[in-house]
Each structure stands twice: as structure tokens, then as C-alpha cells.
Image: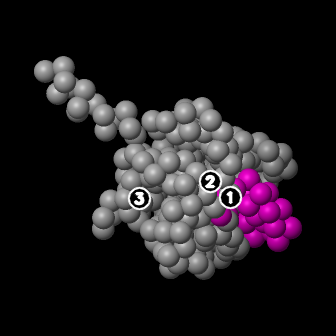
Amino acid sequence: MRILLVEDDADVGQDLADALAEAGFVVEWVRTGDEAAFRGDTEEYAGVILDLGLPRLDGLSVLRGWRANGRRFPVLVLTARADWTEKVAGIEAGADDYLAKPFAMGELIARLRGLIRRMAGHLTAAVTIGRLRLDTSRMSAFVDDRPVRLSVLEYRFLELLMHQPGQPAPAHEIAEHIYGTADAGDTNAVEALVTRLRRKIGSDLIETRRGMGYLIADQRLSAAPDARQQAL
């Protein structure tokens, strides 16, 4: 999943970017408020980690601008300001969660994953569609409760589709989320990735919608009309 990290401190930002990448996220890191505002208004992200103390444009102003423009991605505010009034201001501006520095990296990643899951309508770390289940806390996949060994890119692909059930994802959007902006135009790589995944999890679980993209097929839902016809 593609994450926007907004942090002006070089050391903190690098530590966050490394930890998030190790946790399976594609991280785009910016250091100023104006660049954050532009990225958030023009790009799609699964979630945002936003520091409040930013140069050129403060984090609260950035957040208010995003929400005013209808940007709905979950935002985890990260700041050294421990005053409760700052927390209230952040939440009223549109933040979904708030974490004060210093923080435990594991807690930050768990909170971020929780925000992304809830945005997609999932309440626990286990995300299930039909025969396919992802354990997002362990970055593991199962088909019919059988574990499937996936590469990081394969896992990112499935996680993206599982978090938008029933909604096809175009190849260029998939490329942005699993490779990052620099390689977003490489849709041939996405097709090759789909081919490899179908060999591992079964050709029937990833559906291609011509002109629209890919989605995870829920075999239980697709079988329901036939069942109703038989009942009639």
C-alpha cells in the first residue's frame, strides 16, 4: 500500500521510511508542507503520516486543505506537541488518529494498518474475500486456509485489491501502489505479476475486467445467483 510520509526531520523521516518499507508499505517521503499539500491533492494514497511542525506550511493547514478538497485518505498525525489542545485541533481538522513523539515504531505501524483496514470496512487484521484471506499483521496469505508463499510485490498487489472489494483497480493504479511513482507506468510488470499470482493462488481468484482493471473474485457471491435459480 502506498503511504505519504510528511516529516521534515531527516533522522526521524529516514527511520520511519525504513520501518514502513520493511512492514510492506511503498513510502513517498516529503519534508515541506506545501509539497505535502500538492501530493495529497493530486495523488492517491492508502494513508498519510503527517507531522504538524513543517516548514513553509504547517501540518494543520495542510490537513484542513485536504479535507476541504474532499480528500478522504486516513491521516495519522505525528507530532512532538503533547498538549491536549493540539490533539483536539488535529482531530477537528480531520485527523483520524494522533501519536505524540517519542513513539514506538510498532505502535505507529499497528495504528496505521488499523486506520487503513477500517477505511476499507475491515475490523480486524484478518481480511477475507471468498476463499482468500490475508493476515495484514503478519503479511501472510491463505487460500482455503492453506498458506501461500508470496513475494513482497505479490502481497502488496493482493492487499490493495482486498482493501477495495468489488472495485476494479486499473493497472496504472496498481503500479503506483506496489512500485511507487517512479515505476507507475510499467503496466507490463503488473500483468506479469498477475500471471505469477494466478499460478500460486488459482486462476479464478483474480478477475480481469476489460478496460477497468483487476479485482478479487468472491466465488461465494458469484455462485449465489445460480443457487437462487436452482431453488426456484
Residue at figure coordinates x 60%, y 71% from the top left: 180
Q: In the image, what residue type sits under mark 3?
A: Tyr
Instruction: Name the residue beneath numbered marker 1.
Output: 152
Q: Depth check: 207 or 180 in front?
A: 207
Position of residue 39 measured from the top left corner of the image (x, y, whole percent)? 54, 72
Instruction: Name the residue beneath numbered marker 3.
Output: 214
In the displayed structure image, the side of residue 11 where residue 215 appears, left or right: left
Marked residue nearer the N-terminal end (3 or 1): 1
Residue 143, relative to residue 189: is it above or below? Answer: above
Near mark 1 (Cα within 10 A), the count class, few <14, some 14-19 or many ≥20, is some
Q: In the image, what residue type sits under mark 1?
A: Val
Real-space Cα distance between discs 2 and 1? 5 Å
Local secondary structure at mark 2:
helix
Are the two marked residues, 3 and 1, in contact with CB atoms closer than 8 angstroms? no
Which quadrant would residue 22 be assigned to in this image? bottom right
- Residue 160 belongs to the span the image colors magenta: no
Can residue 186 be seen at all in this image of the molecule?
A: yes
Residue at figure coordinates x 60%, y 79% from the top left: 182
In the rendered structure, which segment of residues is drawn in magenta? 5-26
Q: Depth check: 99 or 193 in front?
A: 193
Real-space Cα distance between discs 3 and 1? 18 Å
In the displayed structure image, the side of residue 164 where residue 15 appears, left or right: right
Instruction: Name the residue beneath numbered marker 2.
Output: 155
**Split into 4 quadrants, where in the image is the N terminus?**
bottom right
